[in-house]
Image (tube, helix red, strand yellow):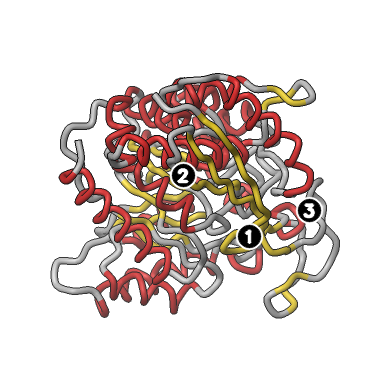
Amino acid sequence: MPVVARLDAVPGEGAFYADDLMAIRAGAQHDGFAYVGDPITPGHAAVRAAARGVLLRIETAAGAVGWGDVVAVQYSGVGGRDAPVDPAALAPELALAGDALQAAGELDYAAACRLVEDLRHDGRQLHTAVRYGLSQALLAAMAAEAGTSPLRILAPLTGLTAPSLRPVYAQSGDDRQLNADRMILRGVEVLPHGLFNSLEAFGDDGGRFLDYLRWLRRRVDALGSPGYAPHLHLDVYGMLGHVTELDVNRMADFLAVAEQAADVLPLAIEAPCFGLDTESTIDVLARLRAELQQRGVGVALVADEFCNGDEDVARFVAAGAVDLIQIKMPDLGCLTEAIAAAVACRAGGLGVFIGGSCAETEVSAVASVQVALAVEADQVLAKPGMGVDEGVTIVRNAMRRALVDWERTA
């Protein structure tokens, strides 16, 4: 088993931006690509700022090297999440982790991740992004030392015996129409995210969202190859609850209309509504899902905000609040935490969605692919960035390479 000999860290950057979701929901207006106004959420220096990260290099005593990236999500600091990444502020946590890993001696992967998860700095767990990055670097270093693939390191944790390509879910950003075209031309299996995070995008009564959904349905037929039938998955960032004042009947009415607009294509709505905390969010989603089931409306509900760790996932699953949970990789910590969340979803009869953020890096995206293959995810987010082509290419090709590595290593 490997011994960690050295941890190096250098400031880096993510592939998108750190945005203050609450300021945007409160009406911050676009100024070109930037936003006008002051941030609301603690930790944000501006409504929009370039995402920052920390690039980690772990070297084992045998000389094997692995890289991992400390990165957070676009909308950090809301929904129970840690603040955006500040490399200088996280330096003491990384120093602590480096010392602890070097002092631990021989470790297998699961034990190394447990050590990272158990560390405390100033009485708190390490930032989720720190844990995420450390677990990526540890996985890469251990695979390199063993002369095997990262997926072979993860397989014993999931019982994986025959990995296969997983469906990809792409996100459009604000350029909803042009980027949907890109997804359809590439035959993306789940699309298009949509980024309906403001009244301007969603419409005061949701009308702009419905107009887009109808357009999207027509566009699939116009551009898609014969037999192409993607799943439609749109994220509304709680805007449906906002415009209906969390009225379950009004939300169910709206989703029934949305289902008709999607026609024969399966439709999932992410974060249709959320409360002020995890408990209230679970409550309103569970009531909405029960109402949809009673009416025979087949729209799937997807959790994101306020579902950030294994305990949160277990609570959402137990309450029957949603049909799918985005396992948002940077928000859970170590890769092993995402695996545990996937197991909990499967046990509760939910699908497995290995997600994350446009604000990540190619290194964290490739690590997420290893997890998605290991847990046989129902969909995996194309990341990083909002360019569609880049994220889809990185994730799909990473899956293909991982499958070749699986066959060539033991």
| Mark 1 Cα-neighbour bin, 10 Å: few <14, some 14–19, many ≥20 | many
Q: Which amino acid type is shown beneath numbered disc 1?
A: Glu
Q: Which residue is mark 3?
A: 44
Q: Which residue is mark 1?
A: 13
Q: Nearer the viewer, residue 275 or 125?
A: 125
Q: Which amino acid type is shown beneath numbered disc 3?
A: His
Task: Pinpoint residue 226: horizontal percent, then vertical percent.
Answer: 14, 72
Which residue appears at 51% of the width and 33% of the height?
Answer: 334
Q: Nearer the viewer, residue 69 or 60?
A: 60
Q: Nearer the viewer, residue 297 or 160?
A: 160
Q: Is residue 403 above or below residue 37?
A: above
Residue 340 in view of the camera: yes
Q: Which amino acid type is shown beneath numbered disc 2?
A: Gly
Which residue appears at 40% of the width and 43% of the height?
Answer: 354
Which residue appears at 58% of the width and 44% of the height?
Answer: 273
Which callout, 3 or 1, points to the residue nearer the camera? 1
Q: Quadrant of residue 331?
A: top right
Which callout, 3 or 2, points to the residue nearer the camera? 2
Task: Pinpoint residue 328: horizontal percent, then vertical percent.
Answer: 50, 42
Locate the N terminus by quadrant. Answer: top left
Q: Which residue is mark 2?
A: 66
Q: Is residue 221 above or below residue 294?
A: below
| Structural distance between the alpha carbons of marks 3 and 2 | 30 Å
Q: In the rendered view, does 50 fall on the left or right side of 392?
A: right
Residue 232 in view of the camera: no
Task: Pinpoint residue 293: horizontal percent, then vertical percent.
Answer: 36, 35
| Mark 3 Cα-neighbour bin, 10 Å: few <14, some 14–19, many ≥20 | many
Locate the C terminus by quadrant. Answer: top left
Q: Secondary structure at mark 2?
A: strand
